[in-house]
């Protein structure tokens, strides 16, 4: 790995560490964050390796073992399951994959604007228990509705709230695909893509402790200026 490539992925790892984002919230708001440089090449490469994992999760077109390909990680398996109210089969030809609960609308100049949609909070089931994602007994998870019949079951609140560039990722995706804007219902592949995105976000959030450990180690021993 070249030095430039290593620096890029190291920066990506640090920027996604929750501890770094908390400690540097002001600088991030001003778009002028400072990235600590590891004191050794070994530390740089170790950080860059984590950054490569982050990059893979952020790239929706890149398969990630255990997340979007191969045997799914057990903690990700219950997330964003496409479900039918009361049970039954999904029939795309009958409009079951149409987004019709107000996820987006055409604003001034035809700009798509996000709207409220339909999000239902409910208690976490035993099968959905995942403390690392805030899914604890007695806690809450979310069901995200396409329409009155079909929904994605069990989207952890931290996954639903996840933002990139100030935009709520899943909600933004849905806002462009309201039937009145898209002119059609979702394809089966598109409906599954929401599940895939939710699982990628969850996997990224589950890296938080590892990313924090890496950031704190780098910050404790930086390259001399």
Image: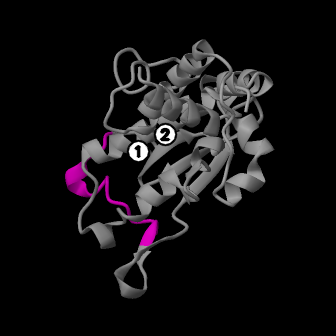
The residue at the point 62 percent across, 50 percent down is: 161
Spatial CA span between label 2 and label 1 = 6 Å
Q: Are marks 2 and 1 in contact (CB under 8 Å)?
A: yes
Q: Quadrant of residue 87?
A: top left
Residue in the image at 35% along x and 42% along y: 193
Q: Give the quadrant of the C terminus.
A: top right
Q: Position of residue 150 (x, y in %)?
A: 41, 50
Q: Residue at x 33, y 31 (%)?
A: 62
Q: Which residue is mark 2?
A: 198
Mark number, residue 17:
none
What residue occupies the far left of the structure in this picture?
Answer: 93
Q: Is residue 38 magenta?
A: no
Magenta stretch, residue numbers: 89-104
Q: Pick whichever, 221 or 200, lies toward us.
A: 221
Mark 1, other Cα within 10 Å: few <14 / some 14–19 / many ≥20: some
Q: Is residue 119 above or below residue 52?
A: below
Neighbourhood count class around disc 2 (C-alpha, 10 Å): few under 14, some 14–19, many 20 upward: many
Viewer can see residue 105: yes
Please tell me whether residue 44 is drawn above or below residue 11 in the rendered image. Answer: above
């Amino acid at each position: 790995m070249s030095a430039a490539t290593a620096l890029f992925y190291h920066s990506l790892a640090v920027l996604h560490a929750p501890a770094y984002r908390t400690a540097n919230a002001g600088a991030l708001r001003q778009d002028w964050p400072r990235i600590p440089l590891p004191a050794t090449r070994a530390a740089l490469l170790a950080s860059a390796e984590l950054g490569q994992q982050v990059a893979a999760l952020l790239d929706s077109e890149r398969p990630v073992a255990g997340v979007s390909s191969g045997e799914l990680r057990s903690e990700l398996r219950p997330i964003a399951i496409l479900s039918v109210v009361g049970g039954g089969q999904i029939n795309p030809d009958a409009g079951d994959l149409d987004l019709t609960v107000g996820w987006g609308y055409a604003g001034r100049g035809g700009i798509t604007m996000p709207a409220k949609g339909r999000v239902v909070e409910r208690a976490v089931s035993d099968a959905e228990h995942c403390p690392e994602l805030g899914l604890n007994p007695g806690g809450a998870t979310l069901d995200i509705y396409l329409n009155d019949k079909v929904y994605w079951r069990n989207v952890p609140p931290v996954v639903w709230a996840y933002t990139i560039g100030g935009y709520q990722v899943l909600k933004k995706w849905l806002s462009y695909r309201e039937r009145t804007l898209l002119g059609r219902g979702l394809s089966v592949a598109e409906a599954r893509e929401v599940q895939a995105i939710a699982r990628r976000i969850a996997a990224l959030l589950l890296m938080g402790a590892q990313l924090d450990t890496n950031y704190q180690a780098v910050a404790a021993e930086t390259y001399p200026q």
